[in-house]
Image (tube, grey):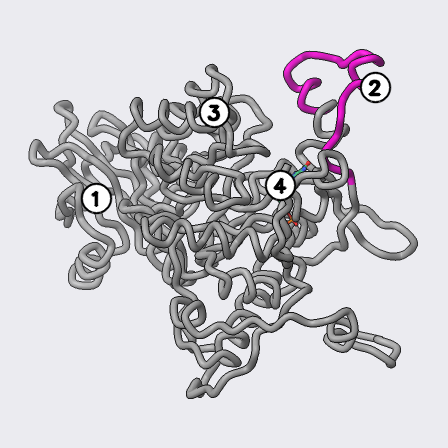
Amino acid sequence: MKILSETALTYDDVLLVPQYSEVDSRRALSTKSCLTKKIALQVPIVSANMDVVTESEMAITMAREGGIGMIHRFMTIAEQARQIGRVKKAESFIVDKPLTMTDAHTVGDVKRVVDETGTGGILILDSNEKLIGIVSTRDLLFEEDEDKSVTEIMSRNVHSAAPDTSLKEAERLLHEFRVEKLPLVDKDGKVAGLVTLKDIMKITQFPKATKDARGRLSVGAAVGVRDMEMRRVESALEAGADCIVVDIAHGDSHLEIEMIKNIHSHFPGAQIIGGNVATADGTKRLIDVGADAVKVGVGPGSICITRNVAGSGVPQLTAVIECATAAKPYGIPIIADGGIRQPGDLVKAIAAGAQTVMIGSMLAGTDESPGMIMTRRGHRYKASRGMASLEANINRNKREGNDLTHEEIEDYVAEGVEAAVPYRGKAREVLNQLVGGLQSGMSYSGAHSLEELQEKAIFMRMTGAGLKESGPHDVEVIG
Ligand code: XMP
């Protein structure tokens, strides 16, 4: 037995000491960071891989706002792939499989397809599948002869581009040709995609969005550590997942290490997030087997009772400082996972060395999380629950076709609770508050970037009285 003499700290134990600042505009400060060495984020926030937090809707919003979402694993492999697919399709500037018809079709055929699908422009191919024309809604507008061949009304002068055209180049060509649709055509004249002005305009609405190399929103997928989970990894990567979270509560374990090794050997290019750990040694062990980021947090989460049940964990600020210090020489980013209740906690987590934070319950209360809004005593709530809670375990088994027996339920040792969290409206509003707080915190530390915040940060411990003074006090809060 060994007793460590150092006191471990968490967010409420400290404050950042204000420092001389030359920041003029907080809102202009960059919050750029990285999830892994290869995945950059404009907003250092990740939505948790919990079934009450991240499915496609949350992941789409997270990526549009500059963060990223991790689709949870408590669903079938096929369903998880569908969820990833939805994120990938949400904002691609390239339609992979545009609607095509052939020169054998009539005006009537095209009108019917346009009515059924709502598609504005149909590409027309010849019998060798080569692009020969395009029919727009305008071409169909006053055309009454439905038996006429489509070749009589289509525009033959189609401007096209190569399949690997970048977003910038596509924008330039759409402008130069004054067209709304730009088919992508390979060297054999076959259609390989379509760029539309409408999709490009949607993209510019979200300038911070996290995107992959093909311009699609980025998303992560969680997997377990059982052998059969390698199929989940394969399916998630095939569906376009940008990273894989190897999700177990005690990540400093041989199960986690074997899974990371396995993923590496079968999918060498995959970005792997390992965790959760709470010590420097645990962090190094995951980095040694190839983790591209390490998730830190044993027991700080709002719905966690691991520390009560297992008596195990490390208060989160100390865990982040120790793990980040261990990861720094390797250049591997740390994700501070759990326990973020307000923007100030995010500032402290980043100042302590994390590159990003993972958030569960704060986002579980938003419109984009799965689940319904409940009303209780005039207040609106949404459900949150630990992934190791009894309720989550019963549901998980039900989904897999096992109805737990009375004994199995009694024997289950839960490490999470079920809870209700206040309804918070749109996830974008929560993210705005968090980012605004982070920028404020940077300004108080005189930092222009998150790296500078980490360099300059001076934490000061405070007493319970200091904590009390830090919140509203001696007033009745009415708003
Ligand atoms: P917050 O505080 O953001 O924390 O709600 C989210 C994180 O909590 C972890 N998590 C759990 N931890 N028992 C635990 O000990 C659980 O049942 C549980 N469910 C989630 C997880 O790391 C998540 O990201």
Tag 3 near tag 2, CB within 8 Å: no
Nearer the observer, disc 3 or disc 2? 3
- Please state which amino acid type lies under the numbered disc 3: His
- Please state which amino acid type lies under the numbered disc 1: Pro
How many residues crowd around disc 3 within 10 Å: few (fewer than 14), some, or many (20 or more)?
Answer: few
**475 up-or-down from 312: above or below:** below
Given residues 69 and 294, the one toward you in this image is: 294
Q: In screen coordinates, is 147 left or right of 245?
A: left
Tag 4 near tag 1, CB within 8 Å: no
Given residues 66 and 417, the one toward you in this image is: 417
Nearer the observer, disc 1 or disc 2? 2
Question: Alpha-carbon distance for marks 3 and 1?
Answer: 50 Å
* Residue at 78% in and 50% down: 381
Question: Alpha-carbon distance for marks 3 and 4?
Answer: 23 Å
Find residue 183 and name its label.
Answer: 1
Residue wearing tag 2: 410
Residue wearing tag 4: 2
The image shows residue 243 at horizontal and vertical percentages of 39, 38
Nearer the observer, disc 3 or disc 4? 4
- Mark 2 CB lies closer than 8 A to ligand 1: no
| Quadrant in which residue 126 is drawn | top left
